[in-house]
Image (tube, coloured by chain):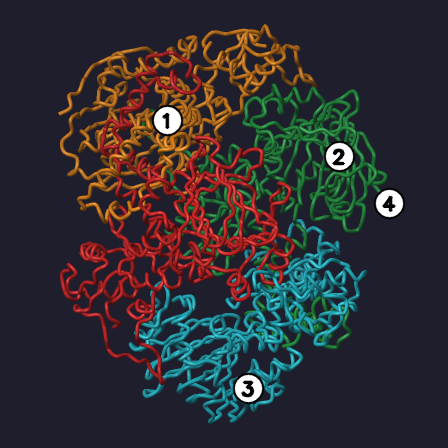
Chain colours: A cyan, B green, C orange, D red
Amino acid sequence: VQEVECVNGDGKDLSALLADLAKVNNSRERASKLFQWLINPIPAKSFFRETWEKKPVLVQRKNPNYYKGLFSTAEFDRILREEDVQYGVNLDVTSYTNGTRETHNPPGRALPFTVWNFYKSGCSLRMLNPQAFSSTVWNVLSILQEQFGSMAGANIYLTPPGTQGFAPHYDDIEAFVVQLEGKKHWRVYNPRTEDEVLPMLSSSNFDQAEIGKPILEVVLEAGDLLYFPRGFIHQGDCLPEVHSLHITISSYQKNSWGDLLQRVVPAALEIAMEEDVEFRQGLPLDYLTYMGVQNSDKDDPRRTKFFIQIETLMKKLTNYAPVDAAVDQKARDFLHDCLPPMLTTEELASSVKGAWRRWERGQVMDDGARISTKTRVRVLRAGCARLCSDGDVVHLYYTTDNSRVYHKEEPKSFEIDAEHTDAMEFLIHSYPKFVTVGSLPCDSAEDKVALAELLFEKGIIHTEEPL
Amino acid sequence: VQEVECVNGDGKDLSALLADLAKVNNSRERASKLFQWLINPIPAKSFFRETWEKKPVLVQRKNPNYYKGLFSTAEFDRILREEDVQYGVNLDVTSYTNGTRETHNPPGRALPFTVWNFYKSGCSLRMLNPQAFSSTVWNVLSILQEQFGSMAGANIYLTPPGTQGFAPHYDDIEAFVVQLEGKKHWRVYNPRTEDEVLPMLSSSNFDQAEIGKPILEVVLEAGDLLYFPRGFIHQGDCLPEVHSLHITISSYQKNSWGDLLQRVVPAALEIAMEEDVEFRQGLPLDYLTYMGVQNSDKDDPRRTKFFIQIETLMKKLTNYAPVDAAVDQKARDFLHDCLPPMLTTEELASSVKGAWRRWERGQVMDDGARISTKTRVRVLRAGCARLCSDGDVVHLYYTTDNSRVYHKEEPKSFEIDAEHTDAMEFLIHSYPKFVTVGSLPCDSAEDKVALAELLFEKGIIHTEEPL
Amino acid sequence: VQEVECVNGDGKDLSALLADLAKVNNSRERASKLFQWLINPIPAKSFFRETWEKKPVLVQRKNPNYYKGLFSTAEFDRILREEDVQYGVNLDVTSYTNGTRETHNPPGRALPFTVWNFYKSGCSLRMLNPQAFSSTVWNVLSILQEQFGSMAGANIYLTPPGTQGFAPHYDDIEAFVVQLEGKKHWRVYNPRTEDEVLPMLSSSNFDQAEIGKPILEVVLEAGDLLYFPRGFIHQGDCLPEVHSLHITISSYQKNSWGDLLQRVVPAALEIAMEEDVEFRQGLPLDYLTYMGVQNSDKDDPRRTKFFIQIETLMKKLTNYAPVDAAVDQKARDFLHDCLPPMLTTEELASSVKGAWRRWERGQVMDDGARISTKTRVRVLRAGCARLCSDGDVVHLYYTTDNSRVYHKEEPKSFEIDAEHTDAMEFLIHSYPKFVTVGSLPCDSAEDKVALAELLFEKGIIHTEEPL
Amino acid sequence: VQEVECVNGDGKDLSALLADLAKVNNSRERASKLFQWLINPIPAKSFFRETWEKKPVLVQRKNPNYYKGLFSTAEFDRILREEDVQYGVNLDVTSYTNGTRETHNPPGRALPFTVWNFYKSGCSLRMLNPQAFSSTVWNVLSILQEQFGSMAGANIYLTPPGTQGFAPHYDDIEAFVVQLEGKKHWRVYNPRTEDEVLPMLSSSNFDQAEIGKPILEVVLEAGDLLYFPRGFIHQGDCLPEVHSLHITISSYQKNSWGDLLQRVVPAALEIAMEEDVEFRQGLPLDYLTYMGVQNSDKDDPRRTKFFIQIETLMKKLTNYAPVDAAVDQKARDFLHDCLPPMLTTEELASSVKGAWRRWERGQVMDDGARISTKTRVRVLRAGCARLCSDGDVVHLYYTTDNSRVYHKEEPKSFEIDAEHTDAMEFLIHSYPKFVTVGSLPCDSAEDKVALAELLFEKGIIHTEEPL
């Protein structure tokens, strides 16, 4: 049986924290601090060493305000009223009654009138991408994604008193259940078999009889945190007297060694076939007469020889594995999954999104300021842009034009000319330091300014001082 | 420099040979004998040991009748007159003049009137699938495919005196050039680089300046044979005074260890991810900060550790390699590529294609004979049917309903119930022996007869005596 | 009740007739004579005036040999044995027992062994395109299509004694039922309602209770003919003692005035909108407030005015109807539907398909004959080629490259340059006269010969004497 | 030459006007009043009688504030700053210099920094769907669409001093050019030919030499209006000293009698073919020998007869024209094109979008009010919902769930049961009167309330008093 740590913790108020974090110079450091706040008082280092991908953990704070400001039912109501929330796309209406799980989504826009009718009749509400509607959730997730190096997502769950909205199941992501309002009774179960440890896909809904006894049973209260790895079965239901609102923050979907190998291995074979004639040699003339399922019971020395040759060649494949190129493919997908950075007022003023130059009094006002070799710049975030090779050419992929809606925008990238790759690497590796445009290793001052202007217009870099 | 064997040989007349071969009881033996005739006097065993996939070889026979009956220009003319030969599909009109290679195909059907006009103006003619039009070519290739365990194809080339139809190039197949009429001047060149030894794809057309000096230069005469492996550059042109007709028999396209590995390796990874949790564990949180092309110059111990883990996992893959299942995939493709068997009169009479029961004198004549448990049967050819597993079920793939036109028919197969797989294996492994239907390892006599009837109606088995 | 003519007739033996017809100089005359033979002794003129599209007619000849040579069950057996007949494509196995109509097609090729098994168990056999397998059927239909100006098709029906293969139904074609062997008991019923007179689509299968009493009941014997228009319900069954073989020749599918208007009317509207500003004027500002189903009960003078304006514009449409262009669209479809002409020995010798020039004794034999201005030529058939306008350009559509398999080939056509249209019209309208190439109204002798060569190579024209 | 009216006018301030209009009880009346304001002082009645679709008209007001509040360059700047404006989708950057028209759109989001850079370099800016970004434009257009019974669209044009952004051309819509800021020099030209009067499609860009002399040349100043029908060529350029901002309001694209006939005529033919046997009768056997382009020069009495029959049938078509059903098809498209209504505060409070029932103090607050038979309701706008027949069933199409972005949402509709169609018609025709739910002609009180609840939840009806 899995041992479960139970600790109490306490931290800092969220809006203050976010204001403080905005002053942290390095986005990676910012991510670490925010993650530490999330799991306080467990030290992140020990969390990742002992708990992450291994076992559930519970933090009970007796501090209902710890996560205050992250999200609320009042915000839920506001969103329904003001935003274009669509049933089935942004909101699910569900119930789990007498062992039956149902979805009740009508077509079209979810308006408060009908949504609250559903809630009053005992249905649970799941908001699927709160980051598109709530700036705070967007801000928090966009910071955390730099901690995980993998997409950080979230769902909001609002459950009426005395009801349960979902059947027991396991997910394919690492889950941080953050209790925001009310209470919820949770039960967590071990993976049923070795094959379901760290599974690649989420499960279907289980019957109560299939899942054994919980290894953890607790009533979460506002301010509490419950973490469990993918594969751990879980279910939550409301006490008779009080509703529950929680947000589940998730990450590490399809982010395993195997997912990376799916890109490494076929590419390694392609390279081996090009470079190593042993891979191009013909199969034995008669191999179909002793290999194949039809012949698998045959005791034939040619079978042994054949297996050995396959093994030899597969082991040679490691010599041709294009690991960095495969990581670039994963990185490209991650940058596409990323939320765009949420800019502070200072960042806005010093980047293209808020750059001075506007229409005033019947004309374009412009103080003439332009990027010059003396302008000091840096990338907006440690991970907001990345050089990746696509065969012979190098592209810069970036997150700054992504949408808060998942994959609403195509992956964003542009080719970096060979003479600019050094400058681009220099810029990325200089972060968080600002460097002068003149210090970019390009051939000419024109080149340096042209590259900086391009990056500025794409929103990838900002200036130390507003232009 | 590649050393080239030059031997003279002699054999047997083709129509007599094919009549003799029809009496050979085992289709694999038949294939060996026919292949031996093709390359006489070189022993097949030494050919495959020393020459195949290694170097060109030439057989000069001084016997213009050695291959007589295989194909002729008179047959070419008959086909144009009687069959639906389409330019671009079945026939190419080409020229290679002053270093320029051109194709002159008009649209539509190739009629003798226009085809011979092209020929008279100096164009070469390439017939692309003579096996669809010539029964002899069909017969020869359908026998040889059992020798190669890989599709045997052929093109016919007719070249006017004093011309050349094709630029120097190499192909992606093992080539047996069989001179049928007239003479042709051939030059063969070594692969230009290691990368072009046993290449995966054919080359484009080369300039004369790109290919160096020939390692073999010869005038082929009727009855001669020239073999060269894929990757060897070659060109042939006609002497001023005489035309040339040759057939190139080919095999081993995409039949390398690498081609098989392309099916083994992704499947191995899929299995490993299901069975071995190490493949499902998450990547390091920060791997994007030190891996990828952007970081490839970094000297970071974490990079070394990452590479080692990739190598470890790739080496573990061999434990999960589903070799027989991957061979079955290749086998399925091969059975789809195969020509259908060309039946002898006796085979016709004892199989569904020619089975007694016909309309005569106003009614269906039927001597009442049916398959019973005493009927003795066997598969029509050693390789005409094959059991392959598709996940949980087993299918029987077969060639007997294939078309003489490449892939004109979809792959042919049907599911074999679990209680029939043993009987099916028994039948296949009994070949070339006939066995009684009663000896099939099925549950009941009805079952045995039902299976035999099914196989008989699909043309997969025939009976020892006509029904 | 529909009155039914019952006449006896007699004619000429088919092979002799076809030989005679081959000598008839004009393909349209040939078509008339063959059609007259089909319906003898009814004069074609009175048939088309009084019977065609109006009522059934029966010809009983007491001459079992009248249609001999057109098709036979022996030919059916030969086709199964030698040709690639596919169930569901070329052959249907059907039964109609106790009011239930079933189709029993297995997948794959129809071999005599299984087909005769079905027949012996009481199933009917319908061969769907006998013209692809039988030269005589091809010849007869390719002649008749010029009589109808609409595709002539055929099905063969072979029915075992004492059975019925099809439920009562009506078709969407004019049907000529030609009894070839044995006997069949037929019942024909009037269309059930005005809406089913000359229907656009075939019916589904009827119950016996739905169709009333037959207006015609007869036992057809070999040599007899039964005609009925589309919309007449019919069913046929075999007497207990004898099988039946008949061929149904059909035409006039989708060949009504309405089918032509479907091409005329939208085109007329398009032209009217381009040429007549009244069609481009805006609708009344408020028309949605009084028109539409929601307002259809309103008694509003604006509705009357609106209807009148629609009527006025629709009547004006006739001024813009591009009738000839629409006929060309129908003609294009008909030429695509057509069977290719079946050439006589003389036609073969004088056209590209059989033109002298062949491979003999190691070279192309060629007496040097070529088309010159003195060569006398004509189109192969009155209807084998047709000039049609496609917007601004003129194309020649032709049937000579069509396949005997329906629509296996794409529509065949090529553009005719403006300077060649007069010559092309001259050639078509000169038929059946041969004219010298020199007499073609082209600019130069080179032009005349080039056009003639092109038409000769496409098989559209032949020469008076072999080249 | 077209005579041009030049009048001066004056009206009311826009925000006051819109506030007043919100109090007008009937949306059609509201539309009339707003349109009258747009074209003041020309009376709408005489405008539609004498000017609409006939000739340009100019209103010079000497009142720069007449259209104030509709849109401004400051609003343009705000939109760039706050909204997701995409180049090529929402914004075009253009220039017309030395007779050359160019588009300069980069990919991606249009940010003020780059947009104002373009403007400063002399490029014109065209915002393509200001209604998606500006509530006032949305409000104005959503009102006007009820006046036109056809989609009302708009573009915004901002042009730097001394430049021209577009080449001379004509459009396929009725255009109302409303000068908002600065000045613009306009030239308007007659359609070049009869064929270009009220054209179906917009023109390409013209050279100055192709368009003749202007019939109207004027400098528009803020507060002025210029109207011209589709087909009138026009161009505008800025004076050296001042920029120009105008909005062009458009309507009547593809809204002609011919556009309606494209739906009436094919449907009429289909009905005629079903109901009238004359349309199903076969074409003459030999029509291909005298009809078609190939025979169009023939003087053949059969041609005359053929033409007469076509004309007779086409005239009969008017008897079968399903005019109301065709209008319904146009209505469906119009309702899909429509902007959703912009609700007043009162409308919001009395409709589903703002209905009471919200999350407060940890629970859903609900005063228990529900729709009952006594509730008084009406449709939100005269044209916001419409009953249309689709073959046998009736659907209600509605605009209230449309998006401000053109066709972002699919057409919205649901089926109305037969027993509810009368009630639905009653509701629609009762507008602008409120009626009690109890007065709906349904079978039961439950039915009445259920229908009203459905319509309320879709936002199609609102209540006289907030629920």
**Residue A99 relative to residue A379: left or right:** left
Q: How far apart are marks 3 and 4 (CA)?
A: 79 Å
Secondary structure type for disc 2: loop
Label 1: few (<14), some or many (≥20) within 10 Å? some
Q: How far apart are marks 1 and 3 (CA)?
A: 78 Å
Rendered-image quadrant of the N terminus of chain D? top left
Q: Are both tags, 2 and 1, on one chain?
A: no
Foreground mark, 2 or 1?
Answer: 1
Amino acid of disc 3: Ala
Q: Which of D325 and A406 is in front in this view?
A: D325
Q: How far apart are marks 2 and 1 (CA)?
A: 59 Å
- The residue positioned 49% from the left and 31% from the top of the image is C410
Q: Distance between the residues labelled 2 and 4?
A: 23 Å
Q: Which mark is residue B167?
A: 2
Find disc 4 in the rendering and name its residue.
Answer: B1
Find disc 1 in the rendering and name its residue.
Answer: C320
Rendered-image quadrant of the C terminus of chain D? bottom left
Task: Tell me the chain of label 3.
Answer: A
